[in-house]
Image (tube, rainbow, N blue to C red):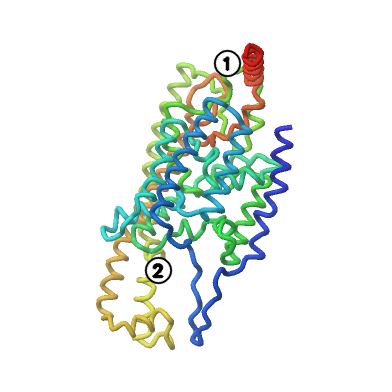
């Protein structure tokens, strides 16, 4: 009955979630300009009062607290699911997905690299609070507070497993997206994490057609493969995974002793459950030590090679910065390499600014991009190497356990655990006893 309830709710609410964008309209009429000016897309909702900012932080804190309680104490999959519906309604549709911890990565980064940028306290709170909770209780933010995760949970009707090799390759994308988001925010090139948010068009009932298609694609894939954005693209999930790996308390599959029935492994659509790993013998440990040394050397080589690749691609990547692109356009117009002007170059010429100042600024930005791109590719080389080490060296465990880094603490495995059924029977008996006494 529990699975059936989720499927019915998914069918009723999931389809309108994906289709209501086709009927979206502007809230205000578009201005009618006679020039070639076109209205740019609105990427953020209008600013709210300070009251609503602090109200959002308070609700975030309460939702994280309740999610942690439901995951660790109540162990109730149904109640976790209901809380995720509330988060989808409030943080998603009511607050229009802004501000969110995922996008706050960029606000925090820009504040660290640009002294003139003012970051609201609410943005800092949204960035830090889920990480603090993950450090103590695991990824309970992903379980029932993140509206993007809730939307994907809602449409997951017939889950299938992703091939391990495919999952390993796709699992590198969140790290690359995180690094690129930090690089672009630090250099002032833009907030690409928000630009590529696949669900923001749904939350705001409007957006570019290509972004609506992007979101529909994720929802379509999410019908059969659990949480594709969370697992294979979300940059904030990387940070949550790092914090959750060292969490003091974490979601456990069974409340008691594992019977190794394998039901939990089959119930998890996210491949976030580690199988039992036997203790290595003395000879195996010796071979493992030799293999570890080779893998560490390989990781260092990958980092060095990555740095070299980053240096080579830094120049074309820097052209994604609007100032650098403008400088190249202005120089191309000055040297007669192109005809006419663009809106950006014409605006620059009419502003009265000096071309030399623009070129100097562009040169400084290229230097920053070069350094940042080299660091990004070194980071990716280290990630690939460490991922390889993790494949060959797994933590010894005797039971089926949730992977602290990858587990979303969604509670899907709770109803499948025989020990959990016994625990629920005892609780029901105690409840009936207290009611009869009362």
Residue at 33%, 84% in the rendered image: 349
Question: Quadrant location of the N terminus?
Answer: top right
Q: Which residue is painted at 51% across and 87% down in the image?
A: 34
Work out whether mark 2 precedes mark 1 in sequence or the reverse, and give the earlier one: 1
Q: Is mark 2 on a helix, strand or loop?
A: loop
Q: Depth-wise, is mark 2 or mark 1 nearer the camera?
A: 1
Identify the residue under disc 1.
257
Q: Position of residue 277 (x, y in %)?
A: 54, 23
Residue shown at 66% from the left, 20% from the top: 421
> Dot 1: what SS?
loop
Give percent across and percent down for residue 24.
62, 65
Residue 391 disc label: none
Image coordinates of residue 156 in percent, x first then y, are 66, 43
Where residue 185 sits, quadrant-wise, is bottom left
The crowd level at tag 2 (other Cα within 10 Å; few <14, some 14-19, many 20+) is some
Residue 201, percent across and down?
A: 57, 60
Residue 262 in view? yes
Q: Looking at the picture, tell me which residue is in the foreground, 160 or 390.
A: 160
Q: Quadrant of the C terminus?
A: top right
Pointer 2 residue: 319
Q: In this view, does 396 lie above or below 30?
A: above
Cα–Cα gap, marks 2 and 1: 57 Å
In the image, farthest residue toward the front: 438
Left or right, 8 with reference to 139: right
For this rendering, which residue is in front, 85 or 403? 85
Tell me the quarter of the picture where residue 370 sits: bottom left
Question: Callout 1: few (<14), some (14-19), or many (20+) C-alpha neighbours within 10 Å?
Answer: few
Tell me, yes or no, if residue 170 can be seen here: no
């Amino acid at each position: 009955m529990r699975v059936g309830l989720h499927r019915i709710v998914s069918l009723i609410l999931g389809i309108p979630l994906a289709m209501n964008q086709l009927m979206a309209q502007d809230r205000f009429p578009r201005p009618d300009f006679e020039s070639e000016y076109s209205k740019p897309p609105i990427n953020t909702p209008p600013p709210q009062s300070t009251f609503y900012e602090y109200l959002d932080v308070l609700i975030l804190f309460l939702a994280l607290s309740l999610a942690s309680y439901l995951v660790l104490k109540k162990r109730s999959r149904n109640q976790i699911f209901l809380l995720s519906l509330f988060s989808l309604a409030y943080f998603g549709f009511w607050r229009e997905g802004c501000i969110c911890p995922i996008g706050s990565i960029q606000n925090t980064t820009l504040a660290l690299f640009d002294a003139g940028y003012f970051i609201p306290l609410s943005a800092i709170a949204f960035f830090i609070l889920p990480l603090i909770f993950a450090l103590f209780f695991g990824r309970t933010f992903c379980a029932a507070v993140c509206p993007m995760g809730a939307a994907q949970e809602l449409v997951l009707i017939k889950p299938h497993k992703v091939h391990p090799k495919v999952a390993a390759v796709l699992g590198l994308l969140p790290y690359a997206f995180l690094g690129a988001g930090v690089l672009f925010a630090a250099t002032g090139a833009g907030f690409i994490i928000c630009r590529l948010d696949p669900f923001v068009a749904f939350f705001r009932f409007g957006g570019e057609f290509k972004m609506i298609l992007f979101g529909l694609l994720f929802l379509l894939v999410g019908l059969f493969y659990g949480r594709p954005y969370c697992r294979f693209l979300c940059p904030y999930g990387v940070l949550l995974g790092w914090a959750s790996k060292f969490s003091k308390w974490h979601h456990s599959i069974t409340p008691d002793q594992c019977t190794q029935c394998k039901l939990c492994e089959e119930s998890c659509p996210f491949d976030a459950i580690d199988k039992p790993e036997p203790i290595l013998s003395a000879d195996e440990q010796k071979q493992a030590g030799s293999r570890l040394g080779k893998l560490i050397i390989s990781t260092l080589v990958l980092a060095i090679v990555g740095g070299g690749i980053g240096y080579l691609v830094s120049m074309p990547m820097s052209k994604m910065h609007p100032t650098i692109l403008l400088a190249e356009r202005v120089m191309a117009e000055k040297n007669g390499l192109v005809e006419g002007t663009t809106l950006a170059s014409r605006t620059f010429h009419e502003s009265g600014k000096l071309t030399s100042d623009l070129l100097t600024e562009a040169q400084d930005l290229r230097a920053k991009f070069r350094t940042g791109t080299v660091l990004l590719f070194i980071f990716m080389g280290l990630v690939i190497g460490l991922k390889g080490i993790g494949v060959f060296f797994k933590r010894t465990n005797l039971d089926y356990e949730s992977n602290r880094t990858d587990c979303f603490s969604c509670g899907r495995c709770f109803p499948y655990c025989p020990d959990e059924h016994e625990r629920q029977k005892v609780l029901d008996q105690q409840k009936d006893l207290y009611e009869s006494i009362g």
